[in-house]
Amino acid sequence: MKIMVINPNSSKEMTHSIRTALEKIKRPDTELTVTCPDKGPIEISSAYDETLAAYYMMDIVRKANQDGYDAVIVACFSDPGLVPAKEISDILVVGIQEASMHVASTLGYKFTILTPGAKRIPSKYNDAWRNKLPYNLASVRPLGLTVTETDANPDLAQKRILEVAKQAVEEDNAEVIVLGCAGMVGYAEKAAKELGVVVIDPTSTAFKYTEALVDLGLTHSKRALFAQPSDKEYL
């Protein structure tokens, strides 16, 4: 199978980190491409960033359809442009937030999302409602880092993940921790071992979830919500 993973921001460094992590877990028969747009925000930390990133991502989604890929993964925890990407795509499109939050809801009664900055806390609560999982969400806790710092400073990011996840377990009764940023790829295993709880890396989880759906021949329905946009002229 062929899977294209799109990092919607324009950071080559974060794209490389995602590629390195997924190369370690992909099946031998899976052809993996990890890419990012040439233009757009260097990190996605606002709704405005999401909108810009989604715009530049659409051409990559179209190209994946044209080039014979079986699936596309949107590797940003905000899932920017996920619905329009599904609209224009005849192949499976998976968002790492959508996939990991639903998986988390099956692995424990309540999950906590760790988000880089405090300003994104309200949006994560909104996303839990959008994904029909508000009652499974124990809390959203910030690391106090930027998205770029979570990828560029592994030691600090790992330290903050352990500290904040421990608070979520002890104070919010979280049974599952979801690392709420693609820049946290590769940090889940150590945190799970030290804390003794389930810790989900959304990018890796979404990738294995996508491999399974491709094997099953499943993709999103085109009947209504994700129907192809009607033909029209765009000026």
Image (tube, rainbow, N blue to C red):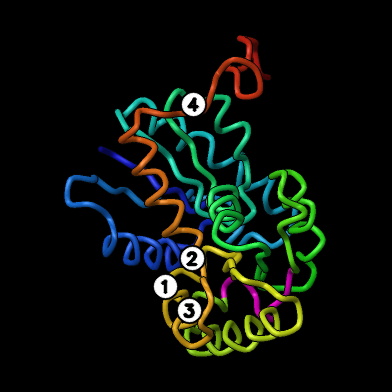
* Magenta stretch contains residue 142: yes
Please name the amino acid that badge 1 sits on. Gly
- How many angstroms separate mark 1 from mark 3 (CA)? 12 Å
Q: Left or right of 131: which side holds 188?
A: left
- What residue does disc 1 label? 186
- How many angstroms separate mark 3 from mark 4 (CA)? 35 Å
Q: Residues within 10 Å of mark 1 (few under 14, many from 20)?
A: many
**Nearer the viewer's eye, disc 2 or disc 3?**
3
Q: Residue at x 17, y 51 (%)?
A: 28
Q: Left or right of 164: which side holds 228?
A: left
Q: Quadrant of the C terminus?
A: top right
Q: Which mark is residue 89?
A: 4
**Nearer the viewer's eye, disc 1 or disc 3?**
3
Image location (x, y in percent) of residue 67: 31, 29
Please name the amino acid that badge 2 sits on. Asp
* Magenta stretch contains residue 17: no
Image location (x, y in percent) of residue 82: 60, 39
**What is the magenta range?**
140-148
Please name the amino acid that badge 4 sits on. Ser
Callout 4 secondary element: loop
- What residue does disc 3 label? 192
Image location (x, y in percent) of residue 194: 48, 88
Relative to 41, is 189 above or below?
below
Q: Left or right of 13: which side holds 2?
A: left
**Nearer the viewer's eye, disc 1 or disc 4?**
1
Using the image as rendered, state which of residue 114 and residue 134 is in the foreground.
134
Q: Residue at x 55, y 90 (%)?
A: 159
Q: Residues within 10 Å of mark 4 (few under 14, many from 20)?
A: many
